[in-house]
């Protein structure tokens, strides 16, 4: 069958280390149905030879679950930040261009350092304050199932960074914490116990690098692989912080 | 001085242990291959079992306990299971307080669903990403402790081995920074391994690429005993794929999904016919064997291929969306069809290891100072794990191992602290080993070799096992071990060198493959996930014993022996899912 000989053409931007110059290498991988970008990179690992027959090193990237839940394999594919495991070759125009999501510092090749996202979760107080893991002989409060459904939607955020890469205001020289951590602040504010720290979270979002840095480009909501309504929650936080600012004024 | 505990692995079990240690006043150094928020626990979809009895079914903790023992074909420690089932509802309440977005009933209470091998609704869930939600809750709580200074994370660090002092007590570890490649030794009062399962030993499976069992194999080679390694769960419903088999949650069957193939031109709902009492909700080992039989022996797979239908198309789309949304997306995304409209095509896949590091009731291994908890231990599932018991055992085991690690740190006979010389020596050994790997210049590619290992293990050590095939497989794996010496490493970089680290992991995987294969070869009976047509029945007389595998330095092979275990609470009885379970 002709199909088995079909090749998939990749142009991959490589970089040996954080301070090295990027360069490109081209690869060809045998086509097969349902092939995705991670599976293609795995094929390159087994035979790291460029399209021109030059021996090279395997491409470095990050991946774990391959089911679009862990968030690890985010990279820029044909100009769009997305999960490589869910990027099916059949849906991509060739040659397929892979680059690191350069909104974040590059570690090597397609691997990036997203630690800033986890640090931001500290800033926005991204947890519910419980007394401890022990028994308290009390049930947690009931929740309106409709509110719980919204919370579930936001809680599927896998810290992949697509929204950060799509946002024109997030970059390595800006202090803006970006859409994902802001939506998380809203998530904890929705929880009946988490709500007790709502003021702290809103205050954090009123500081430098918080909500005021959002330019409302609405790119984030388009980029989110989990279709989280980021702009809606950011707008809600805006209203909440406005109220909070007034309260803060009067309480001074 | 504060007690310092090293926890390796930041999945559900490692994070739970970490929280317990922090609450007891200890300090944790948490090591992980990846940001802990990306650990494999998040792949668990369907839910977590706990007897909440909120569906008018008179469910009881005892029933949960008995279902687990029966489901595990009477090979798990019964006292341990009892403790786990009793703790389950309390753990759910803890998760609820932490903010887990459990799916709720119209009146705002926690909803429950059906799961395999259980007649009552007992499975709490958060859409179809329950593991993700539970993991995130613990990740958030650990982050709060990180801010308070009680937890120091070493993310993108790979565990290499434990360090024992001169009294042979584990007092530290050696780990490697996966970016700078720095190899460093660390002191600890207690070390907990919570490093998950060995799925990657089988190549394609439902596990994450990080689940390679390398850490377990490393401590096995340092003298830790392995329990019941031959019990590998094959999940009946996965989407076969060339890079991985993607899980299709048991929740599909729990919410009414039916499994069928065409027979004589008509749909044949073979699970419902073979097992009238449980139907599509038979446990995983039973369903997997039935699908295997229908495809391989009866050749009735879809279009002659090894696939059967998992059908949800008769269920209203809005109900499916609410209960199963996330996983239906996975199917649509990776296959292209909409399961709301057409039946899914699925086949069994390696999914979970019931076996793992041998531990006592408190999760101590046989090496003093070293503990194990989560999927990397062998404790709670016997010969087969019930669906939705893995999130439970992962979380629960952390509530046992964490406090015990602190007790040991305070009262244990730990012997002397590691000296600077001992630390330096251990680090140097690992550094030298790694440098030697980087210098390898043979003709084998480590990833290609891994692929071959996976093919072998998948073919011979999964659903149906045959002694002569197991002998063949064992010899072939030994050849792969030999071929490992002839690996060539192309990447010599001193920065983020994944190839070098993978080669080291691969050797550990190969040695663990020998453990699984040998233990399977030796157990001449059928029990739970371990099935031999030559010995189709359970043999309690000979094999109501746990398998113990011990590393033999000279041959690099495991020595297999058997040991008694605690089955003091319920007497073994035949396991038959064609009829309702009797006690």
Image (spheres, coloured by chain):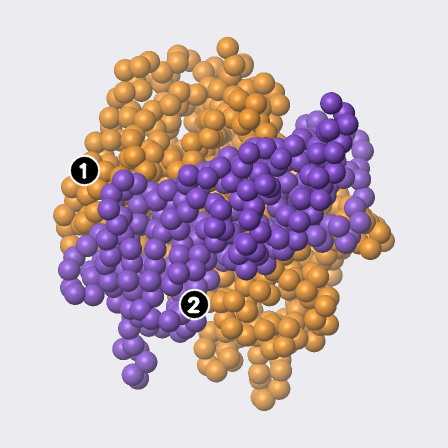
The residue marked by circle 2 belongs to what chain? A
Q: Which element is circle 1 on? A: helix
Q: Nearer the viewer, mark 1 or mark 2?
A: 2
State whether residue B202 is above or below residue B570: below
Q: CA distance from mark 1 to mark 2?
A: 38 Å
Q: Colour of chain B?
A: orange
Q: Position of residue A183 (x, y in %)?
A: 62, 46
Residue B94 in the image, given as x and y percentages of width and height? 70, 36
Circles 1 and 2, Cβ within 8 Å, touching? The answer is no
Q: Residue furthest top?
A: B1
Q: Residue at x 41, y 41 (%)?
A: A172
Write down the residue under mark 1: B436
Q: Nearer the viewer, residue A40 or B65?
A: A40
Query: In the figure, is residue B256 to the left or right of B10?
Result: right
- What percent of the width, then of the height, locates residue B8? 45, 33
| Chain identifier, colour purple | A
Disc 2 secondary structure class? loop
Q: Residue at x 41, y 47 (%)?
A: A103
Nearer to me, B355 or A56: A56
Q: Which disc is residue A88 wearing?
A: 2
For disc 1, the chain is B
């Amino acid at each position: 069958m002709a199909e088995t000989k079909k090749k998939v053409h990749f142009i991959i931007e490589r970089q040996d280390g954080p301070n090295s110059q990027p360069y490109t290498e081209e690869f060809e991988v045998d086509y097969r149905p349902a092939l995705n970008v991670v599976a293609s990179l795995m094929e390159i690992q087994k035979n790291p030879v460029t399209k021109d027959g030059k021996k090279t090193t395997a491409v470095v990237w990050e991946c774990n679950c391959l089911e679009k839940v862990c968030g690890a394999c985010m990279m820029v594919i044909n100009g769009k930040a997305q999960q490589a495991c869910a990027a099916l070759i059949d849906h991509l125009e060739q040659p397929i261009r892979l680059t690191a999501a350069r909104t974040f510092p590059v570690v090597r090749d397609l691997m990036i350092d997203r630690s800033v996202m986890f640090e931001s979760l500290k800033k926005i107080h991204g947890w519910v304050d419980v007394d401890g893991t022990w028994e308290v002989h009390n049930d947690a409060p009931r929740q309106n199932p409709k509110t719980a459904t919204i919370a579930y939607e936001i809680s599927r955020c896998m810290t992949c960074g697509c929204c950060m890469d799509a946002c024109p205001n997030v970059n390595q020289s800006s202090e803006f914490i970006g859409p994902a951590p802001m939506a998380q602040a809203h998530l904890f504010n929705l929880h009946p116990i988490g709500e007790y720290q709502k003021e702290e979270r809103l205050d954090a979002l009123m500081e430098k690098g918080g909500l005021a840095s959002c330019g409302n480009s609405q790119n984030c909501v388009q980029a989110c692989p989990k279709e989280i309504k980021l702009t809606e929650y950011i707008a809600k936080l805006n209203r909440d912080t406005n109220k909070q600012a007034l309260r803060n004024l009067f309480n001074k | 001085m504060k007690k310092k505990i090293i926890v390796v692995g930041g999945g559900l079990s490692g994070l739970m242990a970490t929280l317990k240690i922090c609450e007891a006043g200890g300090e944790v150094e948490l090591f992980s291959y990846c940001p802990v928020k990306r650990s494999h626990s998040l792949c668990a979809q369907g839910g977590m079992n706990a007897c909440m009895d909120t569906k008018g079914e008179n469910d009881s903790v005892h029933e949960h306990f008995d279902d687990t023992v029966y489901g595990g074909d009477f090979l798990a420690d019964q006292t341990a299971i009892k403790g786990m089932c009793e703790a389950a509802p309390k753990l759910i309440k803890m998760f609820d307080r932490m903010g887990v977005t459990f799916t709720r009933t119209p009146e705002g209470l926690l909803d429950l669903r059906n799961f395999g091998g259980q007649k009552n609704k007992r499975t709490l869930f958060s859409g179809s990403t329950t593991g993700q939600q539970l993991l995130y809750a613990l990740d958030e709580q650990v982050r709060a402790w990180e801010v308070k200074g009680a937890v120091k994370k070493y993310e993108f660090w790979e565990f290499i081995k434990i360090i024992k002092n001169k009294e042979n007590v584990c007092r530290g570890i050696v780990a490697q920074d996966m970016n700078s490649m720095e190899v460093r030794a660390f002191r600890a009062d207690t070390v907990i391994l919570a490093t998950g399962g060995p799925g990657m030993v089988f190549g394609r499976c439902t596990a994450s690429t990080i689940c390679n069992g390398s850490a377990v194999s490393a401590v096995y080679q340092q003298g830790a005993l392995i329990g019941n390694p031959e019990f590998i769960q094959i999940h009946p419903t996965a989407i076969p794929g060339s890079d991985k088999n993607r899980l299709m949650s048991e929740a599909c069957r729990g919410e009414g999904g039916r499994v069928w193939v065409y027979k004589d031109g008509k749909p044949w709902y073979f699970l419902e016919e073979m097992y009238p009492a449980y139907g599509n909700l038979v446990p995983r080992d039973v369903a997997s064997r039935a699908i295997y039989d229908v495809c391989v022996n009866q050749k009735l797979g879809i279009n002659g291929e090894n696939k059967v239908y998992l059908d949800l198309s008769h269920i209203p789309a809005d109900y499916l969306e609410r209960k199963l949304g996330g996983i239906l997306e996975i199917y649509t995304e990776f296959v292209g069809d909409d399961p709301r409209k057409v039946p899914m095509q699925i086949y069994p896949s390696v999914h979970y290891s019931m076996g793992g590091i041998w531990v006592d009731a408190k999760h101590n291994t046989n090496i003093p100072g070293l503990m194990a908890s989560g999927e990397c231990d062998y404790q709670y599932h016997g010969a087969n794990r019930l669906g939705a018991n893995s999130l439970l055992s992962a979380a629960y085991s952390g509530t046992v191992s964490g406090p015990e690690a602190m007790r040991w740190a305070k009262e244990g006979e730990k012997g002397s602290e590691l000296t600077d010389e001992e630390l330096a020596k251990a680090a140097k050994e690992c550094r030298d080993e790694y440098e030697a790997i980087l210098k390898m210049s043979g003709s084998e590619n480590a990833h290609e070799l891994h692929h071959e290992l996976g093919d072998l293990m998948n073919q011979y050590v999964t659903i149906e096992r045959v002694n002569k095939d197991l002998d063949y497989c064992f010899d072939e794996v030994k050849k792969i071990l030999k071929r490992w010496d002839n690996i060539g490493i192309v990447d010599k970089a001193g920065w983020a060198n994944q190839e070098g680290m993978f080669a080291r992991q691969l050797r550990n995987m190969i040695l663990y493959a020998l453990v699984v294969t040998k233990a399977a070869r030796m157990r001449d009976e059928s029990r739970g996930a371990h099935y031999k047509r030559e010995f189709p029945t359970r043999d309690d007389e000979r094999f109501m014993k746990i398998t113990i595998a011990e590393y033999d330095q000279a041959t690099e092979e495991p020595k297999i022996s058997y040991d008694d275990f605690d089955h003091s609470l319920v007497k073994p009885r035949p396991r038959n899912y064609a009829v309702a379970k009797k006690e």
